[in-house]
Image (spheres, rainbow, N blue to C red):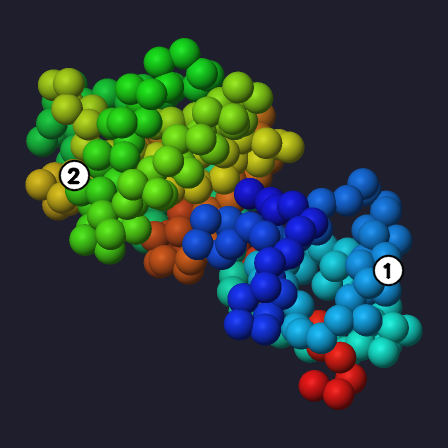
Amino acid sequence: MGLLPLYAESGGTLRIVGGVDVSDYLDLLAPAGGEEEAWAALLQHRSAEAGVWDLHCLRASSPTVSCLPSLAPQYGLRTRVSREERCPVLALPATWDAYLGGLAGKDRHELRRKLRRLERELPGAAVRSHAGAPALDEAMRAFLDLHRKSKPGKARFMDARMEEFFRGVAGALAREGWLRLWFLEHDGHPLAAYLALEYGGSVGLYNSGFDPAHAALSPGIVLLSHLIRDAIERGFGRFDFLRGEEPYKYAFGALPEDLFNVVVTSSEV
């Protein structure tokens, strides 16, 4: 998810609107090739103001990371660039068999073991996905219920204000065809769910939920394998686990991509 080129003051720091709580990638929205011109105009305006610009979650490939340090001194400003996080990302091959063949032997064996175990313990368990705006409210209700049930921290995070945000964003993305909700179910009861973003040849694993009563069967891992297989079969080239370096992401064969923090200050600060 991205952001708007606006800012709001917070404790003397000017933060680009977007928020690391709900966005995995943040950056300036500008026409391709026009990023340097846009930043130059913003820096010129910034040079007359006090305060700090604190820019988070910038991809290593972003023009912001490369052009800000070179532009800032022209306006009496300086920058500090540091790596702050990494996103595990999986480059998808052409076939599921090729994907399995590329996994480490131990990871491939463990994935197959979990798939077989859930099938044996819960025969008839099935995967379904929901895309598009029709019946989205019901799909989101099921997802949010599982999300809150997963962990106490997730239940605290998904308060009424955050639910309103999630439902609003889901509706906007679904209308554009950029959202897909996934469920693993048994006897009509959801065991695990994912909210995935599909855009520009990439699938982003935005958020998840699962039923702790079935945690021993790893329903989230089982469902995730279906998401990856579906992405391969529909021709996506990239599966992005987004922020957070949980071990299970690397067990699926992902590799880390750096995210950077760029802080812009006046020379006197």
Vertically, is 250 above or below 216?
below
Q: Which residue is mark 1?
A: 40
- Residue beneath the point at 20% across and 51% down: 151
Q: Is residue 198 left or right of residue 103?
A: right
Quadrant into which the N terminus falls: top right
Circles 2 and 1 in contact, beta carbons < 8 Å: no
Q: Nearer the viewer, residue 262 or 91?
A: 262
Q: In this picture, is 94 found above or below 213?
A: above
Of all residues, the one furthest to the bottom in this rendering is 268
Residue 187, by quadrant, is: top left
- The amino acid beneath tag 1 is Ala
Q: Is residue 81 left or right of residue 42?
A: left
Q: Residue at x 13, y 44 (%)?
A: 212
Local crowd at mark 1 within 10 Å, few (<14), some, or many (≥20)? some
Between 174 and 49, the one lying in front of the other is 49
Nearest to the observer: residue 187 or residue 15? 15
Residue lying furthest top: 134
Q: Position of residue 267 (x, y in %)?
A: 78, 84
Rendered image quadrant of residue 245: bottom left
Give residue 136's position: percent from left, percent from top.
Answer: 37, 19
Given this view, does label 2 or label 1 mark the residue nearer the observer?
Answer: 1
Q: Which residue is mark 2?
A: 211
Left or right, 9 with respect to 131, comes to right
Task: Residue 46: tell me if it is visible.
Answer: yes
Question: Quick one: SS at disc 2?
Answer: loop
Amino acid at the residue labelled 2: Asp
Q: Position of residue 67 (x, y in %)?
A: 81, 63
Question: How many residues crowd mark 2 within 10 Å: few (<14), some (14–19), many (20+)?
Answer: many
Across and down, in percent, residue 166 comes to 40, 36
Q: Is residue 93 visible in this depiction of the protein?
A: no
Q: Residue at x 22, y 48 (%)?
A: 155
